[in-house]
Amino acid sequence: MVAEAEWTWIRGGLRFGQVFEGTVVRVPRPGAIGIFVDIGLSVGGFVDGLLLPERSEDWPAEGSVGEFETWWADSRQQIRLKPSDPRYPRSDFADFVERFRPDWPSDVGRLVREPGRPAPAASRAAHRVSRVL
């Protein structure tokens, strides 16, 4: 866990869809919870099991290296990720996004913000997704 000020600073620089190269460091309950990913920051990354394939055998194993995108970050000191590698998202990912996060395409490139707070005018403009590798 990091100090609140450090988390605020890290979170303030995150953009939806920002790509990180990461290493899967823990798969506590394959098929149930999700995976923990080291993305090279002082806070960890997490991919929710809902974003991964139905069959846990198709999840990335501990030690797997791949690309992950910022999906969300809230008050929990953890960056929520989605897999970028086409082998790892759930098979109906496009339908899932359409049902549960229809604004995703327009969020990509925008600053991650607190739920309920409007984005600053500057972040409403299209931004190029930065790549952290």
Image (cartoon, rainbow, N blue to C red):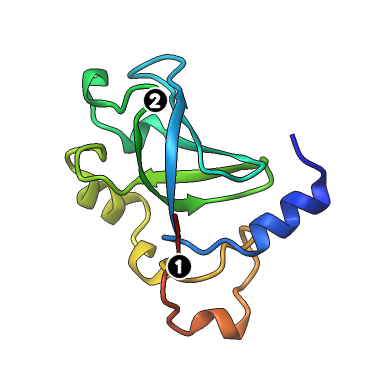
Q: How many marks?
A: 2
**Disc 2 residue crowd, few under 14, some 14–19, many 20+, Cα 10 Å:** some
Residue under label 2: 63
- Where residue 58 appears, as percent x and y from the top left, is 22, 25
Going by the numbered disc 2, the residue's amino acid type is Gly
Q: Which mark is residue 12?
A: none
- 94 over 43 or under it: above or below: below
Residue under label 1: 130
- Where residue 116 appears, as percent x and y from the top left, is 63, 62
Residue 70 vs residue 23, the one in the foreground: 23
Residue shown at the point (38%, 45%) measured from the top left? 82
In the picture provided, is 114 more to the left or to the right than 1?
A: left
In the picture provided, is 42 more to the left or to the right than 133?
A: right
Tell me how far mark 1 sits from mark 2, CA to CA.
24 Å
Instruction: Give the mark nearest the N terminus, 1 or 2.
Output: 2
Residue 132 vs residue 92, the one in the foreground: 132
Residue shown at the point (69%, 46%) measured from the top left? 75
